[in-house]
């Protein structure tokens, strides 16, 4: 991955909304992302969220044009597919703790 840009938006619930803009070299055909590309980003976001003591994270991935990038394959490979709700990855405090150690 060449770069990823995170846009943080806090919510009234104490959760954090994060949109990561993926560089073109990691967006796969069919607008998907792999676990190898997404895993390190999720680890960084998880560690940061823990340090900020947020209740949870709603995570989105998109390309440079703002088109949603599917995280289905990546979340399946990472063992967190049940946390995916449409285009949003819902990370609970427990899941954040697990991901921050990876």
Image (cartoon, rainbow, N blue to C red):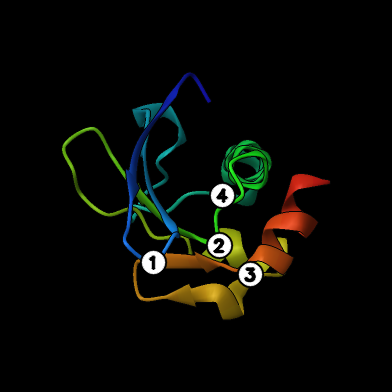
Q: Which residue is mark 1?
A: 13
Residue 21, position as x, y percentages in the image: 34, 36
Cβ atoms under marks 2 and 4 closer than 8 Å? no
Cβ atoms under marks 4 and 1 closer than 8 Å? no
Residue at disc 3, secondary structure? helix
Camera-nearest residue between 101 and 51 = 51
Marks 4 and 3 sit apart, C-alpha to C-alpha, by: 10 Å
Image quadrant holding the C terminus, namely top right
Camera-nearest residue between 15 and 23 = 15
Q: Residues within 10 Å of mark 3 (few under 14, many from 20)?
A: some
**N-terminal of the two: label 4 or label 3?**
4
Q: Which residue is mark 4?
A: 34
Q: Is residue 60 above or below residue 41?
A: below
Residue at disc 2, secondary structure? loop
Q: Is residue 102 left or right of residue 85?
A: right
Q: Is residue 72 left or right of residue 47?
A: left
Q: Is residue 41 above or below residue 93?
A: above
The nearer-to-camera label among 4 and 1 is: 1
**N-terminal of the two: label 1 or label 2?**
1
Q: What residue appears at the point 66 percent right and 70 percent down from the top-left corner?
A: 80
Q: Which residue is mark 2?
A: 55
Residue 65, position as x, y percentages in the image: 16, 37
**N-terminal of the two: label 1 or label 3?**
1
Question: Which quarter of the picture shows residue 94?
Answer: bottom right
Q: Which residue is mark 3?
A: 76
Marks 1 and 3 sit apart, C-alpha to C-alpha, by: 28 Å
Residue at disc 4, secondary structure? loop
Which residue ends up furthest to the top in the rendered image?
A: 2
The nearer-to-camera label among 1 and 3 is: 1
Q: What residue appears at the point 54 percent right and 62 percent down from the top-left corner?
A: 56
Q: What residue appears at the point 76 percent right and 56 percent down from the top-left corner?
A: 97
């Amino acid at each position: 991955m060449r770069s990823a840009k995170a846009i943080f938006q806090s919510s009234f619930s104490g959760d954090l909304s994060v949109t990561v803009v993926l560089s073109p070299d990691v967006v796969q055909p069919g607008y998907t992302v792999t676990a190898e590309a997404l895993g390190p980003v999720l680890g960084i976001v998880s560690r940061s969220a823990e340090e900020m003591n947020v209740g949870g994270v709603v995570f989105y991935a998109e390309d440079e044009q703002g088109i949603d990038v599917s995280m289905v394959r990546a979340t399946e490979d990472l063992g967190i597919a049940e946390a995916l709700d449409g285009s949003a990855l819902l990370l609970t405090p427990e899941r954040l703790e697990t991901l921050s150690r990876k």
